[in-house]
Amino acid sequence: MLGFNFKDQVVWITASGSGIGLAIAKRFAGEGAKLVICDIDKFALKDAKTELEELGAAEVLSVEYDASELSSIKKVFDTLMERFGRIDVLVNNAGVAGPTSPIQDVDPEAWDYTLAVNLRGPFYTIKLVTPVMKEQGGGRIVNIASQSGKVPLVNRTAYCSSKMGVIGLTRTVALELGRSNITVNAVCPGSVAGPRLDFVFEAVAQGKGLPVEMIKEIHYATAAIPEAVESSQVADAVLFLADKNLSSAITGIDLNVNNGSSMY
């Protein structure tokens, strides 16, 4: 029977105090990994650290940070290298929704912030870990992109552009680092269950003057499996792509975890 193998591996997961990032961290904790978690919310980070230690993580290093600031990202990297001296898996999970406006109304500062978190952040973390992974003989990088990195959304230019950029970054860096035994892949979640998705449904329903349940029905109408994705399902895909044995021949892909709401 095949199984994951992350015991004592050092895994850095950005924006891992809650949501998808925490779900991913929980799965790695259950496999005995040494975790580096970071988040802008110091209270969520504290709670996450306690929970991950209880789940069996070998060690948990938590660092408060701002995903939009390069110096803050560098602080996390420097701290993890001082503690562990290596990095086996990098999961770029940090992301923001960005402005929801027609292009003519998008604030350039909001555009810049969205790209800073969603695209510049993964670029910079990969830039930092690449020399370390090369020196130690390999590593695994998994970027959290989005279904919206393939299927554009109206009034979401910053978000969709940034996630399309993450897919392009993934493919390009995979080609560049493959000969160094470093794989680089992306996971593209669809609509993930949780407070954020509930808020979106309620906002759309209010804007259209329709019941929330009708909005949900319309939203899932074209999906093969008409329901939301669970954070744990995204985490399973991440662990598969991060496992050095199970996915050793897979690099440069963008794996949909979206219940078949898009199939390319």
Image: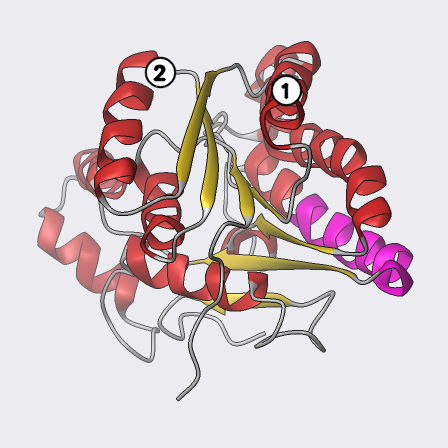
The kind of secondary structure the magenta stretch mainly shows is helix
Identify the residue position indicated by label 1 in the image: 73
x and y percentages locating residue 201 in the rendered image: 22, 43
x and y percentages locating residue 154 in the rendered image: 50, 44
Numbered range of the magenta stretch:
164-180
Identify the residue position indicated by label 2 in the image: 41
Helix, strand or loop at mark 2: loop
Residue at 76 percent across and 52 percent down: it is 168
Q: Position of 9 compared to 249: left or right?
A: left
Q: Nearer the viewer, residue 204 or 161?
A: 161
**Callout 1 touching callout 2 (CB < 8 Å):** no
Residue 2 in which image quadrant: bottom left
Q: Quadrant of the C terminus?
A: bottom right
* Magenta-drawn stretch contains 80: no
- Rendered view: 95 above or below 34: above
Instruction: Give the amino acid type for the residue marked by disc 1 in the picture.
Output: Ile
Instruction: Give the amino acid type for the residue marked by disc 2 in the picture.
Output: Asp
Mark 1 or mark 2: whose residue is earlier in sequence? 2
Q: Quadrant of the N terminus?
A: bottom left
| Residues packed near mark 1 inside 10 Å, few (<14), some (14 to 19) or many (20 plus) | many
| Residues packed near mark 2 inside 10 Å, few (<14), some (14 to 19) or many (20 plus) | some
Residue 254 in which image quadrant: bottom right
